[in-house]
Image: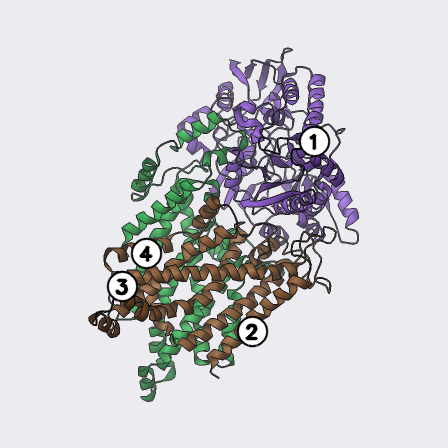
Amino acid sequence: MDAVPVLIGVTLVSFALIHLTPGDPVRILLGGHATPANVAALRHTLGLDRSLPAQYWQFLSGAFTGSFGQSIEYRTSVSSIVGPRIGASALLIGYALLVTILLAVPLAFLAALARDRAGDHAIRLGTTVTFAMPSFWVGLILSLLISLQLGWLPPSGYGTTFAQHVEGLTLPAITIALSLSPLLIRILRSSLIDTLGAEYVSAMRARGQRERRVLGRHVLRNSLTSTVTLLSLFFAVMLSGTVVVENVFAIPGLGSLLVASVSARDFPIIQALTFIFGVAVILAGLLADVAQAAIDPRVRL
Amino acid sequence: MPYRRTGIAVLTGLLAAALLAACGGGTKSSTGGSTTVAAGPPQHGGTLTMARSYDPQNLNPFTCACENGSLQVMVQVFDTLVSYATPDATAKPVPDLATSWTISPDGKTYTFKLRAAQFSNGQPVTAQDVKYSLGRASAPTSAYGGLYPIAGIETPNSGTVVLKLKTPAPGLIYSLGFPAASIAPESAVKSEGDAGFGQHPIGSGPFIVTRWLHGQELDLAPNPHYWHTGLPYLHSVKLMYVPNDNTRILDVRTGTADVADEIPFGQVKPLRESGVNVIVTPSSAIDTVILNNSVAPLNNLKVRQALAYATPVSSIAKVAFAELAPIMNTVMPKLKYWNSAVKPYPYDLARAKQLLASSPAPHGFTLQLNIVGSDTPSKETAQIIQAAWAQVGVKVEIKEYDYGTIQSRWAEGHYQGTLLIPDEDTSDLPVDDEYAHGLFDNYAADKNLYSYYQNAQAQKLAVEALTANSESTRSAAFHELQEVSMAGVPSVPLVWAPYRTAVRSNVHAFNYVLTGWFPLQEVWVGK
Amino acid sequence: MNPGSASVRVGLAFVAFVVLASAIGHFALPAPDAQNLAQTLAAPSLGHLFGTDDLGRDVLSRTLAGTWIDLGVAFGATYLSVLIGVLAGTVAGYIGGWPERVIMRLADVVIAFPFIVLVIAVVAVLGPGIKGAAIGLVVAGWAFYARLSHAEMRSLREREFIQAARTLGFSHRRIVLRHALPNIVRPSLTYSVSDTVLNILYIASLSYLGLGVQPPGAEWGVIIADGQQYLLTAWWISTLPGLVVILVGIGLVLIGDGTADRFRVNRYRLQRELAR
């Protein structure tokens, strides 16, 4: 994927969309009390009275040097608003992917080994149930059960230390994992079945290699390549898709900032976020390639 | 005029709570009231954790949008000359940074004596700081400049400030208690710059900001230089941003938070039944069906009156507001000069049909009603109205938009009818001046709050009330204005939505004050 | 009977059950938007099997009325995405050169673009409603199928039978239509069934943000999202319709699994090709 044209495309589309969308950020910010003179003055201060190409050029030239200008709503630099949230989102997504893998890999193995028998059906149907449940519902039920009834984890809060982050992100990560892992289980299961049926696996078994070694060293390794690819695609979806979970568990991530900024028409923040999302998706793709090469020597970078 | 998440006052929650307790008979400990009652002598120390639905944005009094999230923090950090910090909408302003003041007989000169106080950086609060701050608040480019019709500011000595007005403005003393008129140190604002000061505010109020993680949490600690020795009681305050309603409820139920704001109307009673005190405090908000008076057939008085008669307000108050919100009998907020004698429109479909039949739209019409899609009370209200108005031949098409689109369409006049979030459309002042001016005397600037409603009599009364130098003339004009404007129905009045705040039993003296924020200097937590 | 067709039959039975119930409900139950303000938030009973909502409406009637909208929009959006995506991907893969680069970079842009900004913009321009949401789903959804069929076309381009067709002098159109397309469409069609479930969930999250069907319209996502405000006090409003969504979801997934088995699609290869 050619990173630069894609990034320019992403930012250009978001710039065009957000300016096509009715809604004046200054009006929204100042609300009903503002006089036309107030509005004009603030528009000038924020540079919103300049031509659109000039505004886009300023954004683009700033973006590649890491400067995204001033937020309209917060009246401070965009990087000071967006920066701290990158960590929260990265940690949430990383944690959720980890839980997803821990949940999906063993279940996929069980299902593949019990192909078309009761265990397989139970795993596939059971995961379809969590797949088809909206995440705000799952999140709230988890809160009710684990926070209110059992008192194990707080219902909200991200905290300020790493331990507090992990504590606060546990329920959100499980919520995301419950909706992601069914997809992963299905893909991994079918690729495991394909690999299990492959000739070299039968050959190794015939040569009397230990079953655990065959499964762990060869079957899993071969099946993981497609899984890594899929995880990198999940990553793109999760970047802005965590907004509901962030809302339910009060996590200061990028998804909820994006929705709030769209509502406030805070152009500089929206632009910065779409740019960062674009970069992250491209990086995730590259990482997946590297990981695949590491897992499967046949893949050349 | 605060079309933002501003403002509140405190009034008769006790009565509402008593009624609720009576209705909810048989359930355990149904506690409630407008305030938490202090038990025993206040104790120093402790942390107050509050789960708020708001994320503060900019704490600079001179550039802020002054939405609720920021206002509620600004009042902890800054002092104003006066404050209206008692839970009574009819109370007079009380001294804050000013120890006393006099108003000249012609109502055009205000003289304030300042208290010896220090900002949290140790600098003394000088008359020059007051002059600078009020100068910025009243500047023509200030978003809240309209509240401060100040022509000149003089500082005859370091402890005295004199405000000169062109015309009498009896509402000004109240405006000076609104945080846009916070007193800030001139040198710090200038050295930090407006953007920097909005992130690192310095005031002379009871608290200082010790940590601010945007979108997550804002922490306060006592200001060591606070002029009121012995206050505040709290050792620290954590204001957490928890946007989800259900999560805030779980936070306060599990003790993760001591206080949770904006409890959904329907959850107040169940939460009280689970043993959590929920205080219900009247606000300065109005919830009305805002109509665009410039489009046919809404430009016709009979049509608007018909819509008012066809609106089952008591059903709306019951279903969408759990009978916690009083039904409006005027089209203005319920404030100091409220006229209790005005009659609300009864739900009377026959009358509505009759009015419509003799109007330019005898066979009804189609009306597009914009609402904020994520707001449950708006959605319930809109659907009840849709079903009711259909019975008189008015077909309502509900359109859900995000908050920004609603605001923009409204402010640009691209709407027929719109509902704002019920406690969003609020007065910043505990007196009627702001709305009297905004709704009836501001057509040139913003089409009378984008209602496009013009009425010469209402405008005359509003001007009279805003500039009357005699309290009785002022009061009479406001009372008549409410009569006249209710007859003209620029909007269909619904309810005055109160604020609902869950407060755990270890928190004492937590209270909303006149204009919708909660001073924390006297709040304390027990063991 | 092989396991594939059994799974298709069970899946079809689930979906048919819900569709049939909806048809019966249309005649046997109160109107989905009939309010009864005297009987709000009533728990499930014989009179109201799913209880009533905040406006006293029958939740079962609303849920069943939502079937048409949800299945219609989810299938419509999914298969419009398939159509556009497969055409774009196939053409790109067949022609190559700069059109291929442009189309596939466009798909990359869409995949890297936050979906929510797209939908809010579409809704703000077109006006709110399910139409905006559906268009948003298609605008975001085609790119995935474009990648999938592009990869298939690229590998087919080099295969013997296409090469042979070219050597025999068949026209481009004929090669693509008669020979390549059937092979390309198969994996997309297989994936599309579970994509339909995902689209139902997307519509639900859009409703959670107030961007879906307009009141008083009954749609699963709207019913569930509106009910979450009452989840602590009236669990049935969002939970029982949620179970119906799960039932349909399982049904569709079973159909998808069954057809995949029948087409003998190698999903291992399918997923690998998705990546590039």
Residue type, label 2: Ala
Residue depicted at 56% across the width and 47% down the height: B374
Residue type, label 4: Leu
Rendering coords of residue B279 (x, y %): 68, 42
Examine the rendering and report whether any part of residue C201 can be seen.
Answer: yes
Q: Which residue is mark 3?
A: C94
Dots 2 and 3 on the same chain = yes
Subunit of label 1: B
Structural distance between the alpha carbons of marks 3 and 1 = 70 Å
> Could you tell me which secondary element the residue under label 2 belongs to?
helix
Packing grade of label 2 (10 A; few <14, some 14-19, many >=20) is: some
Dots 3 and 4 on the same chain = no
Structural distance between the alpha carbons of marks 2 and 3 = 40 Å
> Considering depth in this image, is B340 or A82 the residue closer to the camera?
B340
Q: Are marks 3 and 1 in contact (CB under 8 Å)?
A: no
Dots 1 and 2 on the same chain = no
Q: Which residue is mark 1?
A: B330
- Between marks 1 and 2 in the image, the one whose residue lies nearer the viewer: 2
**N-terminal label among 2 and 3:** 2
Examine the rendering and report whether any part of residue A257 can be seen.
Answer: no
Structural distance between the alpha carbons of marks 3 and 4 = 28 Å
Rendering coords of residue C101 (x, y %): 27, 56
Q: Which residue is mark 4?
A: A283
